[in-house]
Image (tube, helix red, strand yellow):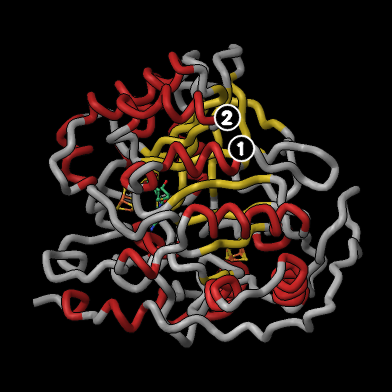
Amino acid sequence: MPARSVIPLVAQRPAGLPVPLPPADTRVQAVDGVQGQTGPVDTRGRPLRDLRISVTDRCNFRCSYCMPREVFDQSHVYLPQDALLRFEEITRLASVFLKQGVRKIRLTGGEPLLRRGIEDLVANLAALRSPDGQAPDLTLTTNGSLLARKALALREAGLRRVTVSLDALDDAVFRKMNDADFPVAEVLAGIDAAQAAGLGSIKVNMVVKRGVNEDQILPMARHFRGSGVTLRFIEYMDVGNTNGWRLDDVLPAKDILQRLTAELPLVSLPPTTPGETAQRWAYADGGGEIGIIASVSQAFCGDCNRARLSTEGQLFMCLFASRGHDLRALLRGGASDDQLGAAIAGLWRARDDRYSELRGAATAARGQPVGAVDAASAPRVEMSYIGG
Ligand code: SAM
Ligand code: SF4
Ligand code: SF4
């Protein structure tokens, strides 16, 4: 039996670090302005701009790189309902985050479309405004399995954009990767429904695993070229502790690019916003653009402006963190909005995380791959819990 099948997942959801309650007379000041906006700045000069909210730790897929079936099996215990942040709690926290500089909110999970009434949460979040009167750039990442059914309701609720994860066009490869025997045709129908519903600038994320779906790079590019959908290739990452990650399984960005340009000439595009994760490329013939997210081979911690709110209200400062900060206790303990804002600002100002950069440096120093376990001393939380 492989060792990873006995990893106790409960240990990977450690209790959140307690967040001290700021004094009751706290008034949040708009300070630390950077990039023309206010809000806290961390120890490396990075502002807080992007909030990813995990709305469920459940999923109907078992992608081997995220929720391998041998670990997330029948006996896996999901969070109980009362542990999850309620929609009012998520909305209230989001409004506080907007006052701290957040401009982009992504709903994720687990599979966010499995959370009952998700459209109601979308409507609540779409109605929020930043202090300068802007609506948040609200988006959602989904495996697409329920998108054909939900796209219109999501658009009507105020969702602006959507990212769909799809790892292959070949049905057999896709069914194997989702390990739930889910057909590719239904995800493609979901993407069509999202386009028809007016969910503009749709992105498709493809995690590339060497020897598993690398032969799908060109078919995926050919399929989405000229469709208005932006395909993004993601290097397979060492998130969590259960996916058995090895550097050998990563197809680096430069190899992905080489495969593409062998058939489809590309020209480099500048980033649209600071902290953007994907390197952008345009098809030379005007057929749209693609992105490559080189999270392993070219770490982009330097301008990382992302915070993650877990399903049960823990705030994580990095995708690879091992502990989160328990905002739910503050929320349910009667903290005011100003107290919550001051607590979030204090946590962000103390932030020093740059896991991918350190892993890259350690690999270079040793002259050999530094694996998931060597690179960090403590076990990391799973992506399905913290939110991708
Ligand atoms: N269930 C939704 C989905 O799959 O789109 C949202 C949650 S999922 C954790 C968010 C994103 O993380 C997906 O695009 C998925 O492909 C990506 N992801 C998960 N595990 C990954 C890994 N080990 N390396 C790179 N990307 C990963
Ligand atoms: Fe589910 Fe998304 Fe993880 Fe796949 S990547 S197992 S769809 S949460
Ligand atoms: Fe941001 Fe952490 Fe990823 Fe670096 S490793 S880019 S700090 S989430």
As measured in the structure, the alpha-carbon distance from the residue carrying label 1 to the one carrying label 2 is 9 Å
Above/below status of 66 relative to 354: above
- Of the two numbered discs 1 and 2 on the same chain, state the one appearing first in sequence: 1
Instruction: Using residue 212 as the reference point, say whether residue 33 is left or right of it.
Output: right
Q: Residue at x 37, y 33 (%)?
A: 217
Residue nearest the viewer, comparing 49 with 356:
49
Q: Are marks 1 and 2 in contact (CB under 8 Å)?
A: yes
State the count of labels: 2
Task: Locate residue 56, reporting x and y percent.
Answer: 37, 56
Instruction: Specify the farthest residue to the left.
Output: 1
- For the point 18% across and 31% down, the residue is 183
Mark 1: secondary structure: helix
Q: Amino acid at mark 2?
A: Arg
Please state the quadrant of the image where ligand 3 appears: bottom right
1 sits to left or right of 12: left
Residue 387, image x and y in percent? 45, 58
Q: Is residue 142 visible?
A: yes
**Which residue sits at x=55%, y=46%?**
106
Residue 242, relative to residue 350: is it above or below?
above
Instruction: Between residue 124 and residue 348, name the one nearer to us.
Output: 124
Q: Quadrant of residue 220?
A: top left
Q: Amino acid at mark 1?
A: Ala
Q: Is residue 261 visible?
A: no
Image position, residue 315 (x, y; %):
57, 69
Residue identified by numbered label 2: 160
Q: Determine crowd level at label 2: few under 14, some 14-19, many 20+ residues with C-alpha closer than 10 A.
A: many
Residue placed under numbered mark 1 in the picture: 126
Q: Residues within 10 Å of mark 1 (few under 14, many from 20)?
A: many
> In this rendering, would 270 be left or right of 120?
right
